[in-house]
Image: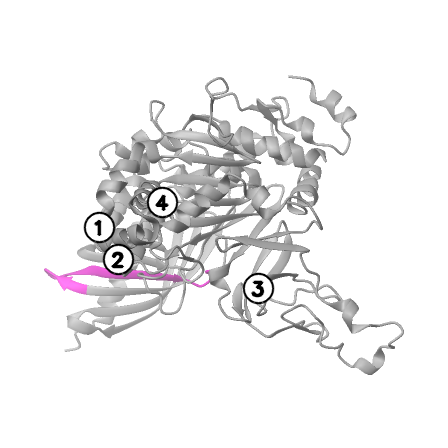
Amino acid sequence: MVGHDELHAAHAHRFDHLVTDRAVHREVYVDPAVFDAELKRIFGRVWVYVAHESQLRQPGDFVTSWIGRQPVIVTHGGQQQPRVLMNRCTHRAATVCQERSGHATHFRCAYHGWNFRNDGTLVSPTFGSGYDLEDFRVEDFSLGQAPRVDSYRGFVFASLAQSGPTLAEHLGNARTYIDLFCDLSPTGEIEVGEAGTNRYGYPGNWKLQAENGVDGYHPNFVHQAFLDNGRGGLAMQLFHGESVGRAADLGRGHALLDSRPTLGEIHERSFRSTPGGQAHYEQLVDRLGAERAAEVIRTNGGQGFNLLVFPNLQLIQIQIRVIHPRRVDLTEVDLYPTLLAGAAEQTNAARLRSHEGFYGPAGGGAPGDLEMFRRVQEGLAVESVEWLPLLRGLRRTELGPNGELIGHVTDEHPQRAFYRRWAEEMAA
Amino acid sequence: MNPVDRSAIESFVYYEAALLDAGALKDWLELFAQDCLYWIPSRAHAPDPVRHVSIVYDDKPKLSARVARLLSGKEYAQEPPSVTCRQVTNVVTRAGADGEIEVNAVLVVYETRPNTAIQAVPAHARWRLTVQDGSFRICEKRVVLTDLDRYYENLTFLL
């Protein structure tokens, strides 16, 4: 490895030297300058997931989220595509909306009473006689808006860049797995929001969660107590060194853990024997045909795959997971369990129970990961050991039909995929 | 005679709290009826387990598995285990349906682990109790956190 100081001098204001195809430098996780640059170069430009259309059914419905650290309001204003408004009064910058979701025709800033329509336009400044029309044109003081908003299968993304790759180009191979995630629904629609949210935070860098959600190497260690708990060893086979599961670099920073080779046939056999399962299966066959229905069930009838969509979106089991960077060493995460529109009540309830068993701040799995993130961030204070290797499975890669780089489920193809894209964005 | 003996019920919920603070999780588990629910909902009003995710929704087998996991030495979110100190106050009791007793109280759990800041978890707790062989059994313990929007780092200890 090349000495870091040397490299640093040659790459002032660039950060791509902190990542190679075989290792990541500790500063990626601890340097506030890296974090600030990530907010501008990654979250300030690439497509970032902000909401799901099922949360915005009626004109006036809104949800709030963040693009990086920037607070946004996603509104249904009656037009085709939702608007993504910057949650920042154009007067003294206070946030104009305090709720996580709701219904509103207007957002009124409490500070000096400026009132904005849910399309972002300012109605008029309060005590308007104090403004001279030569200085003040109402139309200049609309709420800021994300210049580009687009959606795929109801997943709404925004980009703060005026131009760049389209959403379809950005998603690339990830679309296949978003389709599978949604197609398990008898109607092809998922419902986000009604089921509520699990939230957790941890004192560590946001990328630790991004890496971990597609890390098939850790579960048999961190989650041993859960996986081995009276389950006859099947769960332990998922992420074993001899497992038949796969991990993939999908390109563009997206990545996949694929448990279908291990569990697919079991899902296919068991799905129809669950309460409501046979009717559900028949609806899938009607809508998708028998072959696609079987593929969907193999994939997603249970723990089918973990998908990472660069930079901060994951689809895991039944959940949409959104990772919010707060500080270089502080991260908060929203888990949105999804309901399948049109599925039997027992089906959705069983999905929720399964999710709760592992995920959330009191789940049987996720808190172990958070504890590891805390330990990693603590260990990263060591300065004399600079690099974190990503060597696992480097020389056992197959090329997939769509350019995927595929390896063993415990290999580090997903992490190499993420950091290759990271370095590309951070170099430009 | 009033079937709801308030002081006996208070003694019971204090005993339950003491078992948890002492880490006597197996003894605590035995306080639960076979057909029981230990529930931490993710919304305060009208939570519906069929449509709404919970933070914890454990029947007896799941609760037993949770206790086994916590005692396994391999639940790393509890390595080392949390030390808790809890207050149960504002206890209100009333007769419930089918001879059950309903208890409502304010629960505040102070939790510490090395290298983490002390965590205060305020909640409204509700128990449905029944009497079996002269002892109380918990049919349901429901803990409604007062700050459900919070990004909790660790709620793996028992409330």
User: How many angstroms separate mark 4 from mark 1 (CA)?
Assistant: 20 Å
The reply to whether discs 2 and 1 touch (Cβ–Cβ < 8 Å) is yes
N-term-proximal mark, 2 vs 1: 1
Task: Please report, as a chain letter, where disc 4 is located.
Answer: A
User: How many angstroms separate mark 2 from mark 1 (CA)?
Assistant: 9 Å
Residue type at mark 4: give it.
Phe
Span of residues in magenta: B130-148
User: How many angstroms separate mark 3 from mark 1 (CA)?
Assistant: 38 Å
Residue type at mark 1: give it.
Thr
Protein image colouring: one colour
Q: Circle 4: is it few (<14), some (14-19), or many (20+) Cα within 10 Å?
A: some
Judging depth in this view, the residue of A407 and A361 nearest the camera is A407
N-term-proximal mark, 3 vs 2: 3
N-term-proximal mark, 3 vs 1: 3
Residue wearing tag 3? A80
In the image, residue A270 above or below residue A92: above
Q: Are marks 3 and 1 on the same chain?
A: yes
Residue wearing tag 4? A358
Residue wearing tag 1? A274
Determine if the magenta segment contains residue A57. no
**Viewer can see residue A426:** yes
**Helix or strand or loop: what does disc 2 sit on?**
helix
Between label 4 and label 3, give the one nearer the viewer. 3
Residue at 74 percent across and 77 percent down: it is A124
Residue wearing tag 2? A346
**Helix or strand or loop: what does disc 3 sit on?**
loop
Judging depth in this view, the residue of A179 and A386 nearest the camera is A179
Q: Are marks 4 and 3 on the same chain?
A: yes
Image coordinates for residue A323, horizontal then vertical, percent: 53, 47
**Helix or strand or loop: what does disc 4 sit on?**
helix
Determine if the magenta segment contains residue B135. yes
- Apparent side of residue A308 relative to residue A144 in the rendered image (left or right): left
